[in-house]
Image (cartoon, grey):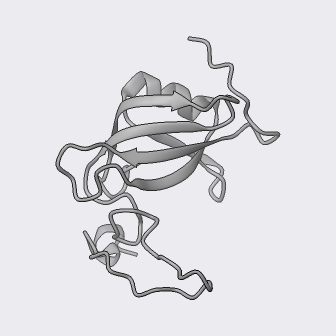
Amino acid sequence: MNLDFKFNSDGLIPAIIQQTQNGKPTAGRVIMMAWMNRLALEKTIETGFMHYWSRSRQKLWLKGESSGHTQRVLRWYADCDVDALLFEVDQEGAACHTGHASCFYQSFGRDGSPEPITDSLIFDPEQVYKK
């Protein structure tokens, strides 16, 4: 397969993750953004489940490897400049490590002040990650 995308100087490309319809409360919503390197993209294509590159841990990771909250790929796209990817996934559980369905749960007013969080937690991160 030709993976001739425009990876940045660190060998990474941004991946935007969107929840598919499938009756989920977050249907159509962007649930997270993460980075992929060539290996993460290859593993995602090979397995059908989202893999990413952790910049902080400097390692490949399968989404849900510790939480069980996996992302099964249904479709994916490259943007017109081939320097960003969009994946439509079926999210099992929550996308965010904080327990929220989406990593984008904090909204802000036009003046920049945070608005009350209205999203409910899907899980307790203390229980799932047992830190």
From what the image shows, is residue 49 above or below residue 101? above
Q: Residue furthest left?
A: 23
Asked whether, in this view, residue 33 is left or right of residue 55, the answer is left
Q: Residue furthest top?
A: 1
Query: Which residue is painted at 51% across and 29% down in the image?
Result: 77
- Residue 6, given in percent of the width and then of the height, sits at 73, 30
- Residue 106, given in percent of the width and then of the height, sits at 46, 76
- Residue 124, given in percent of the width and then of the height, sits at 28, 76
Q: Residue furthest right?
A: 9
Between 99 and 104, the one lying in front of the other is 104
- Res 13 seen here: yes
Asked whether, in this view, residue 30 is left or right of residue 99, the answer is right
Between 41 and 4, the one lying in front of the other is 4
From what the image shows, is residue 57 above or below residue 60? below
Query: Which residue is painted at 30% across and 43% down in the image?
Result: 20
Q: How many numbered tags mark residues here?
A: 0
Quadrant location of the C terminus in the rendered image? bottom left
